[in-house]
């Protein structure tokens, strides 16, 4: 039998490596091993455990914590998304979760997934486009007036927006108080992102991000609008741009390093940060800064369009769908899911050529007070491109009289689930519809560029 001298003591002490007093433990173990040269590795470990306690690694559980599904497996929700959610719910910090009817496979956690975590926050479960969100402005414009001026308004919208990789505005054209937020100075890392964030301020991401002019039909009374009334609005979808993507990438890496210190057998992408630790609080603050920045981007798009078009605004609503909320029951992560607490207003977009919805949450506890964030994909971007039928797409948009700019083959209605099916699975359960919104001008960002 090899003596303890022949053993690499640090390997035996791997479970203690994350402790602040690990150097003390390692030194004491080495001294004991030298004094007891015939001791076996098991005897050394027993001596360490007697003196310093038994350190247990966190690991995945045998069975997933409970999660609700709002749709039938294999019919509305793909099996691979369910399998992915089961892995999420096997994490030792996962408490309960839910899959929305638009759920599909994502990175680590399904898009359309919601999870409550105990005193833990996961950058990858928030996603790479931190605080990707929706915003709606309604104008003092009738549908008839809008359709008569549609091409001019589309030109104004194109002139006041910038999409995709490299999107920015000349210095001084876009300004917002968010760039004076003191949180940019919290860390050297965030400070290094500020110049790029300022350059991209007021722009939109590529891929599925959009700015649409819609005819809005109210089906319920809301904020001075009556059921049966029509109006016109601007609906936008975008997030925190390059700054958000780099923030996510940075903290996903930090979470992986942290989780390796306290856990074993955690798959790549499923790591977390302890909320009561300095690094967890640092990420939470950075995420919230990216949330403020994403909101500023939307406000600038809407404000500049309203001013350039000479329109009056009557109403504005917004919601985030890639974010984490610290609540009494835990940290609620919604990755591609809309907050739907009782009475909370939300926006659920369809695809580029289908109806979108203004909704009110019903506070369903099983969904962790959430709803879908859109129609949800049937296919990956690659598969959507392979299946794309350009002629069918053009006929569809022409039949519905939709002007469109910047659509890629993986962003047509053909790539997405039927929004009417998705809404039927949650109407009266997760949300109630306030208004249906029909696109008449669709402006999109082209190729995907920043994690959308």
Image (cartoon, grey):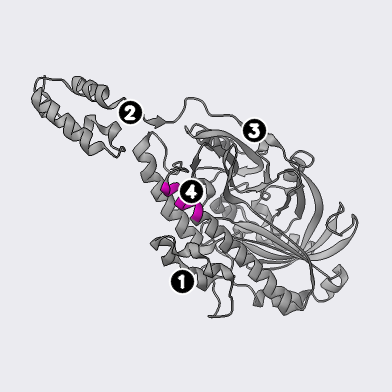
Q: Which residue is mark 3?
A: 68
Label ID, residue 195: 1
Secondary structure mainly formed by the magenta segment? helix
Q: Which residue is mark 4?
A: 123
Q: Which residue is mark 2?
A: 55
**Which quarter of the figure is the C terminus placed in?**
bottom right
Q: Is residue 211 left or right of residue 128?
A: right
The magenta stretch spans residue 279? yes
Is the Cβ of the residue at disc 1 closer than 8 Å to that at disc 3? no
Graded by Cα atoms within 10 Å as few (under 14), some (14 to 19) or many (20 or more), the crowding at tag 4 reads: many
What distance separates the C-alpha of mark 1 from that of mark 4?
23 Å
Q: Secondary structure at mark 1?
A: helix
What distance separates the C-alpha of mark 1 from that of mark 3?
42 Å
Residue 354's place in the image compared with 36, above or below, is: below
Q: Tell me which segment is drawn in magenta.
A: 278-285
Residue 27: image location, x then y, percent: 17, 34
Q: Mark 4 or mark 3: which is in front?
A: 4
Q: Is residue 99 left or right of residue 235?
A: left
What distance separates the C-alpha of mark 1 from that of mark 2?
45 Å
What distance separates the C-alpha of mark 4 from that of mark 3?
22 Å
**Which quarter of the figure is the N terminus placed in?**
top left
């Amino acid at each position: 039998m090899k003596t303890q001298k022949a053993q690499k003591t640090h390997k035996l002490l791997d479970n203690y490596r994350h402790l602040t007093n690990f150097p003390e433990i390692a030194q004491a173990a080495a001294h004991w091993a030298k004094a007891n040269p015939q001791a076996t590795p098991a005897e050394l470990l027993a001596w360490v455990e007697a003196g310093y306690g038994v350190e247990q690694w966190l690991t995945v559980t045998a069975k997933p914590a409970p999660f609700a599904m709002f749709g039938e497996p294999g019919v509305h929700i793909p099996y691979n998304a369910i399998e992915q959610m089961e892995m999420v719910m096997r994490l030792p910090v996962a408490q309960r979760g839910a899959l929305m009817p638009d759920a599909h496979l994502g990175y680590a956690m399904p898009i359309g997934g919601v999870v409550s975590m105990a005193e833990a926050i996961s950058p990858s479960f928030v996603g790479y486009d931190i605080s990707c969100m929706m915003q709606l402005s309604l104008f003092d414009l009738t549908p008839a007036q809008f359709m008569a001026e549609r091409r001019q308004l589309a030109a104004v919208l194109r002139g006041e927006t910038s999409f995709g990789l490299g999107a920015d505005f000349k210095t001084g054209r876009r300004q917002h108080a968010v760039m004076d937020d003191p949180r940019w100075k919290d860390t050297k890392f965030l400070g290094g992102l500020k110049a790029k964030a300022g350059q991209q301020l007021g722009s939109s991401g590529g891929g599925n991000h959009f700015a649409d002019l819609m005819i809005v039909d109210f089906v319920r009374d809301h904020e001075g609008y009556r059921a049966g009334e029509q109006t016109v609005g601007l609906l936008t979808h975008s997030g925190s741009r390059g700054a958000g993507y780099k923030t996510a990438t940075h903290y996903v890496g930090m979470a992986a390093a942290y989780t390796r210190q306290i856990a074993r057998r955690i798959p790549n992408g499923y790591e977390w940060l302890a909320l009561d630790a300095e690094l967890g609080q640092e990420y939470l603050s950075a995420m919230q800064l990216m949330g403020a920045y994403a909101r500023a981007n939307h406000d600038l798009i809407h404000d500049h369009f309203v001013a350039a078009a000479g329109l009056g605004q009557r109403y504005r609503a917004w919601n985030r769908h890639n974010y984490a909320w610290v609540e009494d029951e835990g940290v609620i992560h919604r990755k591609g899911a809309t907050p739907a607490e009782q009475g909370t207003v939300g926006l659920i977009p369809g695809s580029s050529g289908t109806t979108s919805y203004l909704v009110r949450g019903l506070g369903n506890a099983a969904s962790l007070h959430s709803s879908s964030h859109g129609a949800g994909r049937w296919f990956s971007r690659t598969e959507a491109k392979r299946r794309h039928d350009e002629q069918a797409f053009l006929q569809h948009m022409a039949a519905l009289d939709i002007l469109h700019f910047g659509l890629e083959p993986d962003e047509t209605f053909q790539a997405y689930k039927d929004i009417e099916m998705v809404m039927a699975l949650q109407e009266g359960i997760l949300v109630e519809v306030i208004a249906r919104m029909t696109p008449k001008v669709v402006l999109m960002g082209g190729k995907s560029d920043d994690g959308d």
